[in-house]
Amino acid sequence: MYSKRDNSLVKIKDLKEKILEWQKNIKIIPESERKKLIDWINNIDQDWNISRTKMIWGLTFPFYEKDGKIYPVNIEELPIDPRIDKEKMKKYDGKFFEDETVDVWIESSITSIIILYNALTENKEFNPKELPELFNKIKEYLPVDLRQQGYEIIRTWLFDTIVRVNLLTNKSPWKYVLIHGMVLDEKGRKMSKSLGNAINPNEIMDKYSPDALRYWALLAAPGNDYRFSTKDIESGQAFIIKLWNIGRYIEMNIQRKARKNFRIKR
């Protein structure tokens, strides 16, 4: 359920023209998929409600309400979960949103920022005091190169990330977006648990190889649904083996020639 509080809304209706300009900074592959994004932007008729109620999972809000205004907790208190961190909450004279969690797309819409954060803090302990400095450093690396995603979440993940990252950093999240379709079974049906036609990629890689699966995936046209094909997997495996044999043959002859030249020089 959505929260009914006005202060849980991101005012995106008034940003239509800006968002239309922001999306121009990104190359979308295939270009035909851009129309879905533009249509969604042009048809925005409500603001983005970022709060969910009655949810037992999800991130909680690190904010509290006092005298009709919203305030953030001290950065040193992060992370904070009002459902369990009762001691931390005592120092704040306000009401926390204990029965609300963040819309999942609020989390997902900063993936380009989070990826850079993880790269910059690898093997380091979390220190909230470093967040402002890290955030400025992250902005230097934006936009990142590529987002890969399906066409079914253009109106959510793609749109929300463009909005969120531009609002936070004044930069695009990525240079390129590669849109792919759905994987279908060999009969052209959508893979699903109810049909029992889903393929476990780990089983394919165990039976053939990861490269054989990559070969099959590379045959797909961006933006289009693509049938799974055992024959294409087998063709990919045969092709990879040929490449491997060619590489081994070249390597052995280079080594043989190198040893021969070494003996002549001596």
Image (cartoon, rainbow, N blue to C red):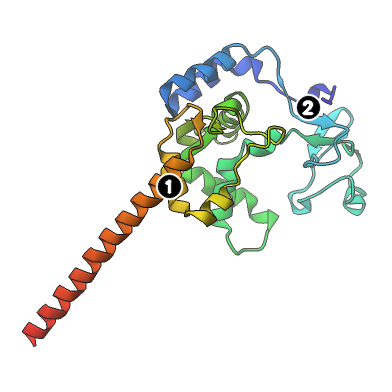
Q: Quadrant of residue 215?
A: top left
Residue at 55% of width from left, 31% of height from top? Answer: 182
Q: Mark 2 or mark 1, which is nearer the start of the sequence?
A: 2
**Position above or below: 135 against 69:** below
Which sits in the foreground, 254 or 198?
198
In the drawing, does residue 61 fall left or right of residue 200? right
Q: Quadrant of the C terminus?
A: bottom left
Which sits in the foreground, 259 or 24?
259
Distance from disc 1 to disc 2, alpha carbons, whole Å, reads: 52 Å
Q: Amino acid at mark 1?
A: Glu
* Residue 55 seen in the figure: yes
Residue sitting at the far bottom: 266
Residue at 89% of width from left, 45% of height from top? Answer: 83
Residue sitting at the far left: 264
Q: Which residue is mark 2?
A: 8
Q: Position of residue 100 (x, y in %)?
A: 85, 35
Q: Which residue is mark 1?
A: 234
In the drawing, does residue 231 fall left or right of residue 158? left
Q: Sort mark 2 into few (<14), some (14-19) or many (20+) by Cα contacts within 10 Å.
A: some
Tag 1–tag 2 contact (CB < 8 Å): no
